[in-house]
Image: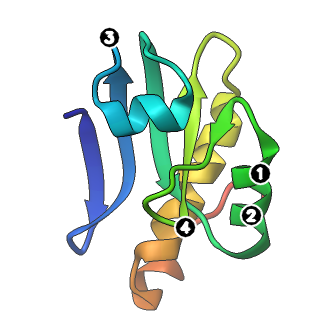
Amino acid sequence: MGTRWMVRKKTFAHVLLVDAGWPPAYAKAAGSDGPTTLLMFRSSGAEAHALRTMGPPFIAPVWRADEVGLILDDTVDWDEVAQLLTESYCVLAPKSLATRVDRPGA
């Protein structure tokens, strides 16, 4: 379901559609039966905590403490998405790869 981007067999980003309550775990996490498009990504430390407790458009799935969801709608800030996805990659990538990444806003 959806499309996943991976580094070393670990998903750092996942985009999927919630529609008619399916998939149920994502519908429950988003608080919506849809249609809603979600971007799931990884975060760590204080940033993960802040994003997970911020509320909409961010969601906090119960299945992984380092995962955050973002509801993609007409108001999404694509520069912020680029930054979140870059950081998500760096959270899971081996240090030798993460150090090669140009991080937006850094």
Residue displayed at 43% across by 74% down: 92
Disc 3 secondary structure class: loop
* Label 2 or label 4, whichever comes before in sequence order: 2
* Label 3 or label 1, whichever comes before in sequence order: 3
Q: Residues within 10 Å of mark 4 (few under 14, many from 20)?
A: some
For the residues labelled 1 and 4, say whether their Cβ atoms are less than 8 Å apart. no
For the residues labelled 3 and 1, say whether their Cβ atoms are less than 8 Å apart. no
The percent position of residue 26, horizontal first and vertical second, equals: 40, 36
The residue beneath circle 1 is 53
For the residues labelled 1 and 2, say whether their Cβ atoms are less than 8 Å apart. yes
The answer for how far apart the CA atoms under marks 2 and 4 are is: 9 Å
Relative to 81, does residue 41 appear above or below in the rendering? below
Disc 4 secondary structure class: loop
The amino acid beneath tag 2 is His
* Label 3 or label 2, whichever comes before in sequence order: 3
The residue beneath circle 4 is 66
Relative to 68, does residue 27 appear above or below in the rendering? above
Task: Give the position of the C terminus as an image quadrant.
Answer: bottom right
Task: Give the position of the N terminus as an image quadrant.
Answer: top left
Relative to 73, does residue 90 appear above or below in the rendering? below
Residue furthest out toward the bottom: 96
The residue beneath circle 3 is 20
Q: Which one is nearer the viewer's eye here, 42 or 102?
A: 42
The residue beneath circle 2 is 49
The percent position of residue 70, horizontal first and vertical second, equals: 58, 36
The answer for how far apart the CA atoms under marks 3 and 2 are is: 29 Å
